[in-house]
Amino acid sequence: MKKYVIFAKYSSEFYTAMLNKPKNRLEFVKPILKNLEIELVEFLLTSGSNTNFVCVVKAENDEKIEILMSIVFASGNFSNYSWSRAFEADEQENIFKIGQEKMNDYVSAMQVAGIG
């Protein structure tokens, strides 16, 4: 499974609801994760002004993450979000090794123009 990092900012509506009736939000998230076959690695609330929620998950593909985020964003709990594929150090090393091998096939615009 691939690893992803989700960043989000809770909405004022979320804070209003939580202050009126505090709940452990993780319990609400677990069923949708299970339904989408997404594995939870970390579920963290942070004190940032642009991002105050960070989540690390594992999923089969990007589509499952986009489905999850569409559902969660539609709930009104977040005012914005972003997600990114995350790579372990050995995965990143392999990506650069492949890039190094394939770089010889790349012809830059400058080379085509006879400049480089």
Image (cartoon, grey):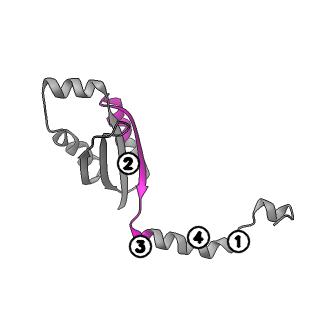
**The residue stretch that appears in magenta:** 69-91
Task: State the residue in front, 60 or 96.
Answer: 96
Q: Which mark is residue 99?
A: 4
Q: Position of residue 103 (x, y in %)?
A: 66, 71
With 103 as the anchor, is 109 left or right in this view?
right
What residue does disc 2 label? 64
The type of residue carrying mark 2 is: Lys
Q: Closer to the N terminus: mark 4 or mark 3?
A: 3
* Vertical comparison of 113 with 69: above or below: below
The residue that appears at 81% across and 65% down in the rendered structure is 111
The residue that appears at 87% across and 65% down in the rendered structure is 114
Residue 17 figure quarter: top left
Task: State the residue in front, 27 or 9.
Answer: 9
The type of residue carrying mark 4 is: Gly
What residue does disc 1 label? 105
Q: Closer to the N terminus: mark 1 or mark 2?
A: 2
Q: Which mark is residue 90?
A: 3
The type of residue carrying mark 1 is: Asp
Tell me whether circle 1 and circle 3 mark residues in contact (CB < 8 Å). Answer: no
